[in-house]
Amino acid sequence: MNFVQQHRQQILLEWATEAGKAASARGLSDLELKNMMPFLLTALAGGADREKALGRHIESHLGDRIRRGFEMGEIVEEFAILQRCITDCARGSPSSERPSEEELARIFVTLQSVMVRTADVFQEHMRLDEQHEKRYLGLLRTLADQALRAPQEQPGSLTDRLQEAMQIVREATGADAAALLLYEPESRNLVTRAVAGDAAAQLREFAASVDLDSFTGQVAAHAEATVVDDVVTTELEVSDALRFSGIHSLLGVRLPRHRRFLGIMYIGLREARTFSSREIRRLEALGEGLTLHLDNAKLHAELRERLAEVETERKLRERFTAVLAHDLRGPLSTAKMSALLLKKIGNGAQRPELIDRIHSNLDVIDRMIHDLLDVGRLRAGQRLPLRIDWCDLRTLAEEVVEDLRLVHGCCFEVAGAHDVRGMWSRDELKRALWNLAENGIKYGTPDSPITLRVERRAHEAEIGVHNFGPAISGANREHIFDPFAHGRTPPRVGESWGLGLAVVRACAEAHGGSVSVTSDESDGTTFTMVLPLDARPYQPA
């Protein structure tokens, strides 16, 4: 009787014992461990005809092992263990039962041919696997290119692209789920941006911690991949959404493995098992590819933002030049014509109103230039310099109203308390009140009064400038005090620089106070400045 056939059970038992101790046997059931060896032993005992039939079983065995992530060395080790077991069995058998040298040589040649064939099939698989990986990396690259070319205005385009990227990652790794979490420095959390596959609904919306006792924190903290064999039994902190999602095994990678932290990506399996080194390598390769595209997307977004800022600056300069030419031409022409009339008359004392008109228009030009200089100072991050002295807010409001009446007529009034004195900058407050009243003229209802109301509180003074007219929307109120911003468009009278209210806020803050606005259709619009009675403690040393 053939030696292998005679000692089949003994050889198979010894092989199962030795192979079960090998690292490659982890995660395999007894049936899965022995799925190939009975057929191989039958072939070894049956001669050439049986060896020819062995090919189909080898292909099936290799396919199973490769799908489970076995490396070539682990697969070949199973055959090497079998060869040792046959050798040990032959040595331990009685001399009458030992195989001849020819039979033993034939057995070993057959085993060697099986190992060579295994190596060839594995190399072919690795070549195809590399092409497979390149294909999915190519899909990620194509997806990123489409995202970069997409119009910036498309809502949700980035979210859609990330969702498609996770679907590609899931397919490339054969996982049941894939998720991308990006880091938000403000909240110091990882926020899920895209999920594909099973349990997507449960995993889509939650923030994960970067603490080291959590799965996500472990992934974020290490350049090497993090593996969890079963989320149900792991000691790491895992979100409830993930723990009860039906996903068991997790494999996570940091994005990027080195350099500034962007986020993490992980895949999940419904079965509880470990991941092979090839599965880990593939996810790391996909993670590196995705990181490159995320970096490009970030740079592209920053470039678009910068271009938008440059375009905004260009439009502001054009508008600034147009408004400057328009607004300066008016008062300069008026002053010039008044000066020519005085020259013809020859005696300025006979026409005092012309002198007042010249002074008034030159004051307008001076305020415009002053506003421009101060807005430049504010945009450079500086405060308005103040010359502080005693002044009366009611008296100041009345002086502003008198100056405005010379330009716009009698549509202004002052109300409220008298003798509201404090330590303030007279010139800056006068300019702020002028700007607020001018703003009321530009946007208010024609012929309705502009009211300046002065009040005194316990430790503060308050002055409000009110006009009737169209309400300012909530969205516009948020930015109305920013330089070059417009809260109501278009202005009813003249052009608007978008500088006056920025100067008003700067004046209030330089005094240690604040300015606010309320606006609705029925009650009109009121800008209110609140000032401490003494602004000196709020000045820089």
Image (cartoon, rainbow, N blue to C red):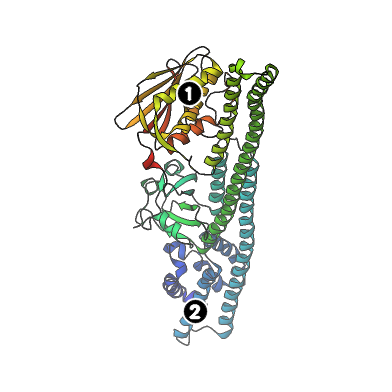
Front-lying residue, 290 or 86: 290
Q: Is residue 259 above or below residue 319?
A: below
Front-lying residue, 411 or 215: 411
Please report whichever mark, 1 or 2, sits nearer to the chain's N-terminal start: 2
Instruction: Determine if residue 475 is in view.
Output: no
Q: Position of residue 300 (x, y in %)?
A: 61, 46
Query: Mark 1 Cα within 10 Å, few/some/many (few <14, many 20+)?
Result: many
* Left or right, 48 with reference to 15: right
* Left or right, 154 with reference to 272: right
Residue lying at 61% horizontally and 59% vertically, measured from the top left:
129
Which quadrant of the figure has residue 413?
A: top left
Q: Amino acid at mark 2?
A: Arg
Q: For mark 1, give the secondary structure.
A: helix
Q: Amino acid at mark 1?
A: Val
* Residue hosting label 1: 400
Residue lying at 63% horizontally and 32% vertically, measured from the top left:
320
* Residue hosting label 2: 84
- Tag count in the figure? 2
Q: In the image as oriented, which residue stretches furthest toward the top?
A: 447
Which labelled disc corresponds to residue 289?
Answer: none
Query: Mark 2 Cα within 10 Å, few/some/many (few <14, many 20+)?
Result: some
Front-lying residue, 413 or 442: 413
Q: Position of residue 429 (x, y in %)?
A: 45, 31
Q: Is residue 225 above or below residue 491?
A: below
Q: Position of residue 316 (x, y in %)?
A: 62, 34
The CA span between labels 1 and 2 is: 106 Å
